[in-house]
Amino acid sequence: EDNSDIEGSFNKAYNEQQKMKQLSLVRFWQMLSAGQAGVYHFTYGEDFDENGILAFLGSCGGQKAWKNPALTDEVAVCSSALVKDSAEIHYFVDRDTVRLVTKPEDNAWMQVDFKDKLIQPSYYTLKHYLSWDTECLRNWILQASNDGIHWVTVKKHEEDASLSEKGATHTWPVQSRGAYRIWRIKQTGVNSNKHKYLACSGIEFYGQLFLTKFDPLQGVQNR
């Protein structure tokens, strides 16, 4: 076979694989919509690609144009107090790069609640905000909870300089020992400008998404 035949065969196989993947994503979305139990593994390709869990939730399994999943009630988001000219907290799970930043307080945090779904991530991605190359995260933790009260620290970052300019993104591997419903980043020290502002314009997760019969607890508290 010449190279063109091999390339043609490869492309055909790749297209078939993508088609099967799309069909399985649609099927998984149908299971989610029907309230059925199930699990799907979302594989990281590159930062904020179409393969993430929030990308899936915002596109109805790749069937529709993407919409912010916090605005369609697939997830709920909240945070510690934001500065007056910050974008709204729903941009924490958006694709756009905006000025999203908390007030400069100890232990500032931003959170996403997957409601009746649990995730066990293998990777997670963050994006720095739009305003300045400074104020980048340096010291923070990724935490998980199923009730908003008891938290498990899944990953700890100390003087992590991975984010270095406005709109910059980075992805980190995660070793989670369990699946959880609520995930947050919480700042544990000063940022790159020696301030306590938590500036972040996006988060994404890759790994296992579990559809459960989990009944979201009423009156979830934030600590």
Image (tube, helix red, strand yellow):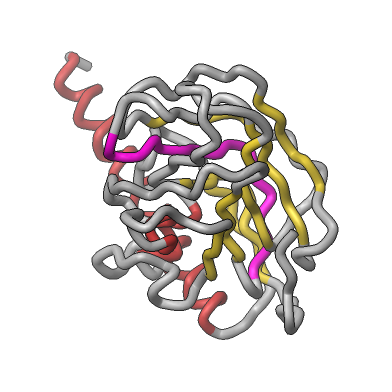
Please tell me whether residue 102 is drawn above or below residue 22 in the rendered image: above
In the rendered image, is residue 61 in sight? Answer: no
Residue sitting at the far top: 2
Considering the image in quadrants, where does the N terminus appear?
top left
Q: Is residue 1 magenta?
A: no
70, above or below 48, in the image: below
Q: Quadrant of residue 31?
A: bottom right
| Rendered position, 12 above or below 72 | above
Q: Residue at x 42, y 34 (%)?
A: 45
Residue at image x 49%, y 39%?
Answer: 197
* Secondary structure character of the magenta stretch overall: strand
- Above or below: residue 95 compared with residue 7: below
Left or right, residue 132 beside residue 137: left
Task: Pick whichever, 213 or 141, lies toward us.
Answer: 141
**Residue 216, percent from left and from top:** 71, 79
Nearest the viewer among 126 and 129 is 129
Q: Position of residue 217 (x, y in %)?
A: 76, 79
Q: Is residue 152 left or right of residue 106?
A: right
Which residue is located at x 51 percent, y 81 percent? 33
User: Where residue 44 sits: x, y (%)?
Assistant: 48, 37
Residue 129 is inside the magenta segment: yes
Residue at point 40%, 77% (across, down): 72
Quadrant housing residue 172: top right
Q: Nearer the viewer, residue 141 or 38?
A: 141
Quarter holding the C terminus? bottom right
Magenta-colored span: 117-131
